[in-house]
Image (tube, grey):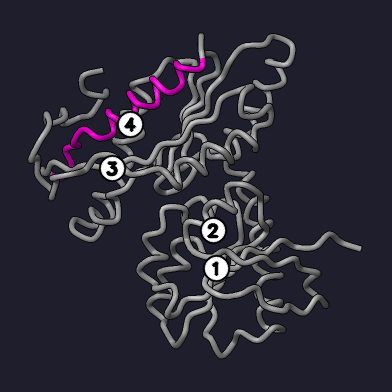
Amino acid sequence: MKPPLRILCLGAAAPELCAVPFGPFVATAAAGLDAAAQALNEQPHDALLVHLGAGLAPEALLHWAAWSHAVLETAVVVVTPGPAPELALQLLQLGAQDVLGEHEGTPANLARALGLSVQRKRLERSARQAFAIDLGTGLPNHLQLLEHMSHLLALREREPAPMALLVLRIEGLATVEAQLGSEAANVLRRKAAVRLRAGLRASDVVAALGADTFAVLLGWIDAAADGARVLAKLAAALGQPFSVAGKELALAVRAGLALYPEHGKEANTLLHRALGQASTASAEGRVGFVNRVERGTPAAANDEGPPGL
């Protein structure tokens, strides 16, 4: 008998799901966005089933800090209260696997959507293994990061030394895209990647985990406090303005940290912790910026390195 699929339900009670042919399922409910983020952080789930309605508005879901974490690790299925083609398209573009209308939310339809979405997510992960590079930045993607971490962790079993994994989730790209277009947002993302790379040692690894999330692997640190110090330095660097299309633009940053061996000895465990912290952390920076510099020191136009570091 195949193991049950773990389903986390948000916005409604856990439904009864038909086990055949797409299950079996184990469904649990989260009381709200914060509880869902905590549940995803504490334990892997195969799918996240979201019911939009009176208790959960679309705007709240679209601005949920843990969305990137959710779509990276789980198959997200959203049920909308009525016809909403623009919302459905937006959710799919942001990484949801399926969007259903409320009239489609029968136990049989939900079971089918969840089962197929989980399988699509698994195929998506397998397909991404063939592409080791994030095309937008030239950085390794999260699968290559995990592979590199696994090799390094195996080495650390023989030659113990502390390591740190940092995750930085940036906010502000959507605003730039809405105001200046997708190319400006892509340029800003690339400049953020360059600034991260310039602030690190050659031996450190920077990877792109998604459209708005970067990871940094510090393969060797002298003490655990070094991880937090470097994370604060990089977050401050990303908080300095960028010059794009003749304008000074700013990003906010949510940061997460996982330490080896204190927080785990496996790559997935460390990444899961750092991603969860970045999803629930408060955003820092971008206060007082509306496509112009209102505080701080302007960054160099080519952004070859983090200012002041």
Relative depth, front residue between 270 and 151? 270
User: Residue 22's x, y, as percent?
Assistant: 78, 73
Which amino acid is tagged 1?
A: Leu
Q: Secondary structure at mark 2?
A: helix
Q: CA distance from mark 3 to mark 2?
A: 23 Å
On the image, which quarter does residue 192 sit in? top left
What mark, if any, has residue 235 been given in the picture? 4
Q: Secondary structure at mark 3?
A: strand
User: Residue 247's x, y, as percent?
Assistant: 11, 44
Magenta: main secondary structure equals helix
Looking at the rendered image, the disc whose residue lies closer to the viewer, 4 or 2, is: 2
Q: CA distance from mark 4 to mark 3?
A: 9 Å
**Residue drawn at point x = 66 percent, y = 50 percent:** 44
Check contact, mark 2 vs mark 1: CB within 8 A.
Answer: yes
User: Residue 212's x, y, as percent?
Assistant: 39, 47
**Considering only order in the chain, which callout, 3 or 4, is on the residue closer to the N terminus?**
4
**Considering only order in the chain, which callout, 1 or 2, is on the residue closer to the N terminus?**
1
What mark, if any, has residue 10 been given in the picture? 1
**Considering only order in the chain, which callout, 2 or 4, is on the residue closer to the N terminus?**
2
The quadrant of the rendering that contains the N terminus is bottom right
Looking at the rendered image, the disc whose residue lies closer to the viewer, 1 or 4, is: 1
Which amino acid is tagged 4?
A: Ala
Relative depth, front residue between 141 and 53? 53
Looking at the rendered image, the disc whose residue lies closer to the viewer, 1 or 3, is: 1
Residue for badge 2? 36
Relative depth, front residue between 72 and 279? 279
- Magenta span covers which residues? 224-245
Q: Residues within 10 Å of mark 3 (few under 14, many from 20)?
A: many
**Considering only order in the chain, which callout, 2 or 3, is on the residue closer to the N terminus?**
2
**Most extreme residue toward the bottom, as rendered?**
103
**Residue drawn at point x = 27 percent, y = 49 percent:** 172
